[in-house]
Image (cartoon, grey):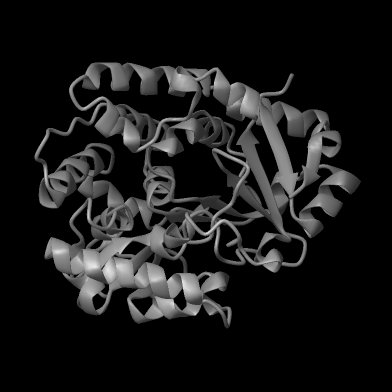
Amino acid sequence: MSSLRYRAGKKAYEIIRREGLDFDRIGTFVGPAVGPRWLTASGFDLALLDAGVLGRSKPVLLAGSSAGAWRFAAWLQPEPIKSYKNLVENYSSIVYRRGDGPSEILESIKQVLNEYIEDDAIPFALTNKKYRLSVATARGKTLAGSEVHWIQKIGLYSAFLCNAINRNLLHRFFERVVFYYSPLPPKFCLNKDFRGRAIPLSPINFKNAVLASGAIPLVVAGVRDIYGAPNGVYRDGGIFDYHLNQDYSIKENDIVLLFHHQEKLIPGWLDKRLKKRRPPENYLDHVLMVHPSPEFIQRLPGGKVPDRDDFTSFMDDPGTRIRNWQKAVSMCSHFGEEFLETVKSGQVRDLVEKL
């Protein structure tokens, strides 16, 4: 039995059912903001990197938010597989202590970033011919832009209430800012419903943009005044773009690839408790989502994918958490090979389901 499920939006489903999946059709690969759950994607990513199936005929956009941005920043490095494995190892092994505040946590994840991205490799990354990177962040406004904990908390709670009423009200508290590497801003940044800014990546702002994309409000300190962008405090890109909250298609017959840890898609971070909030249907038309089956997830340590709650649950026993995460990574390591074989054999035509 396959460990993976394949779900596709209307147009992607029709294409795959008719002719299978041609990797040259993939114009965008989306990396959602999922915290430690991204570890389930590591085997998938590494197999695609090793096979070199993306970006053969045209550059592929790697659209990352938070954990997705961390993953895809490794794809652009001179030795991407080595960089990616360093990220997996150092991220899995990170340890927090009781009493660590947002500033201490920011410093910890900054160390992880420095371990897998070398400063002198960034200019090379920004000349990559196969992959183009976009990094989603959110610039705080008014109370949500404060680094004073209780003020930021009030701002975030206000943002949640307003977002629950109307998602457009979220723009009163945060501004979507996407940092990109490509000759022109990514197509999704030019859509009328994008509502944000697009700022070019450079060797000066590359690390800060990636770091800010994972700066979870109230948990991790924000990154202030990123070079080339408006002044302010930049936070987790998942505030706007949590799992999928854009139309990432580039051309009419393109496929948007998304590896996810679950079937459910949530558009923004503040939508997690809004059970009826879903991405707009037209955003899903070109999407092929690959995710582990529920049966497989039940076999992982604790019967679940790694998540941020593990830091708290194993605060006094980090060794067990690290071993659980490493085991999960090992158990998911075949996902990429399984995906490649399913595509190569043509079985994806029979396995794909409607999203």
How many marks overall?
0
41 w.r.t. 113: above or below: above
Name the side, left or right, on which 156 lies relative to 265: left
Quick check: 175 left or right of 252? left
Q: Residue at x 68, y 60 (%)?
A: 284
Taking the view exactly as shown, the residue that stands out farthest to the right is 18
Q: Report which quarter residue 312 is drawn in.
A: top left
User: What is the quadrant of residue 328 in the picture?
Assistant: top left
Q: Is residue 73 above or below residue 152?
A: above
Examine the rendering and report whether any part of residue 227 can be seen: no
**Residue nearest the observer in this picture, 35 or 188:** 35
Q: Residue at x 51, y 36 (%)?
A: 45
263 left or right of 40 in image:
right
Foreground pick, 96 / 341 = 96
Q: How far from the left and from the top, in percent, is residue 92?
A: 31, 28
Q: Is residue 175 above or below residue 138?
A: below
108 shown above or below 15: above
Q: Looking at the picture, how far across and down is residue 161, in whole percent?
A: 40, 71
Q: Quadrant of residue 87?
A: top left
Q: Quadrant of the N terminus?
A: top right
Q: Residue at 16% x, 41% y: name it.
A: 108
Task: Return the x and y of residue 335 as percentages of the image width and height.
Answer: 59, 27
Can I make out residue 107 in this image? yes
Rendering coords of residue 228 (x, y %): 26, 75
The answer to which of 12 and 101 lies nearer the viewer is: 101
| Viewer-nearest residue: 75 or 212 | 212
